[in-house]
Amino acid sequence: MGEVYDGPILEIDGLSISFFTRLREIPAVMDFSVSVKPGEAVGLVGESGCGKSTVALGVMQDLGVNGRVVGGSIKFKGRDLSQMSSAELRQIRGSEIAMIYQEPMASLNPAMRIGQQLMEVPMIHGGMSKREAHARALQLVTDVKLPDPERILKAYPHQLSGGQQQRIVIAMALMSEPSLLILDEPTTALDVTVEAAIIDLVKDLGRKYGTSMLFISHNLGLVLDTCDRICVMYSGEAVERGSIADVFDGMRHPYTQALFRSIPLPGADKTARPLVAIPGNFPLPHERPEGCNFGPRCDYFVAGRCDQGAIPMLDVPENTRHATRCIRHD
Ligand SMILES: Nc1ncnc2c1ncn2[C@@H]1O[C@H](COP(=O)(O)OP(=O)(O)OP(=O)(O)O)[C@@H](O)[C@H]1O
Ligand SMILES: [Mg+2]
């Protein structure tokens, strides 16, 4: 088996990703770093268009015809994904890294019974026998708390509700016991009560199987509730990174503060804590300002300081695991 690897499962360092169109280069992600340790759940939050899905697709090495990593590196269990052969990548994507998308039907084959779809994963990638694969499929359908698992295995996807389909997608993602599960807005298409149940489920399964998770959501409340650490993105960049406690109790970036004020927190009384929308507009990738991207919308903006040059990620004093991209964080 070789040496036991005990470093981070995922290590993204200074990652920059651009999309190339006929007119211009669109820098969708810039100088982005985050790491996910074994068993850890890291949340990635930020407004629509800030680059969350691009990071996820970068990890999957699936940026389409016009997307490209233009800087930095993505390491999975210490190995740079860009150095791997396409055969190796296919193997990793099929068994070691699994991704769950917003829309469950995008991951299900409408013409194939649920059982067959679930069993295919470990039979193709893990060389599991049909009997073992069936036993595992049955176990996972039970784990994701679907009623009458035997009947579900015989059903076609359209015979299930949206919430049930998403549970099947989660079961499918866990069939090969991946070390990393990427969830890209997995509950956006579901209603709120179903969403809460799915999130609880993901939390429990993460614990049961020791799976590391990168959880993408624009819902800060969900991330606070599910993750160990959080990374806040704004306009292609990470602006704050730390443990949930560090960031929640001592947020250092004005955008994180504004984001917290603009979202409902779990169990919060709406009258006691009115929601405040963030004034101004999110800059498009080719219209970013000089200096801090959040500068034009920031209450603490100082001309001559915040609008000069690139702003690096800075460690918050006395806490090397808490960092912020604000030169006036103190
Ligand atoms: N294939 C593409 N070609 C050109 N631009 C793209 C492409 N995919 C994404 N982009 C651009 O990259 C930026 C980041 O997009 P991304 O989908 O990563 O955002 P997101 O944070 O996932 O947003 P959402 O919350 O809406 O899912 C956006 O400006 C988007 O328009
Ligand atoms: Mg997205």
Image: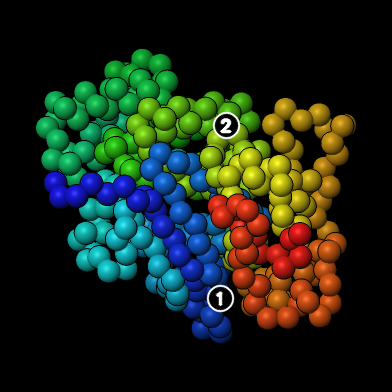
Amino acid of disc 1: Ile
* Mark number displayed over residue 195: 2
Q: Residue at x 14, y 26 (%)?
A: 131
Q: Give whichever of 266, 104 is nearer the camera.
A: 266
Q: Is residue 37 visible?
A: yes
Q: Which mark is residue 137?
A: none
Location of residue 148 (image quadrant):
top left
Query: Residue type at mark 2?
Result: Glu
Nearest the eye: 9 or 214? 9
Counting residues from the start of the chain, the first of labels 1 and 2 encountered is: 1
Residue 117 at least partly seen: no
Quadrant of residue 158 within the rendered picture? top left
Disc on res. 26: 1
Q: Are marks 1 and 2 in contact (CB under 8 Å)?
A: no
Marks 1/2: CA–CA distance: 33 Å
Q: Where is residue 107 in the image (x, y as percent from the top left)?
A: 38, 44
Q: Relative to residue 62, is residue 297 drawn left or right?
A: right
Q: Which residue is drawn at 61% across and 65% down?
A: 313
Residue 309 lies left or right of residue 91; in this view the side is right
The reply, left or right, for residue 161 in relation to residue 76 is: right
Q: Which image quadrant is residue 76 in?
A: bottom left
Q: Which residue is drawn at 55% across and 70% down?
A: 30
Give the residue at x 73% y 80%: 308
- Secondary structure under tag 2 reads helix
| Residue at the top extreme of this rendering | 148
**Does the residue tagged 1 have its C-beta within 8 Å of any atom of ligand 1?**
yes
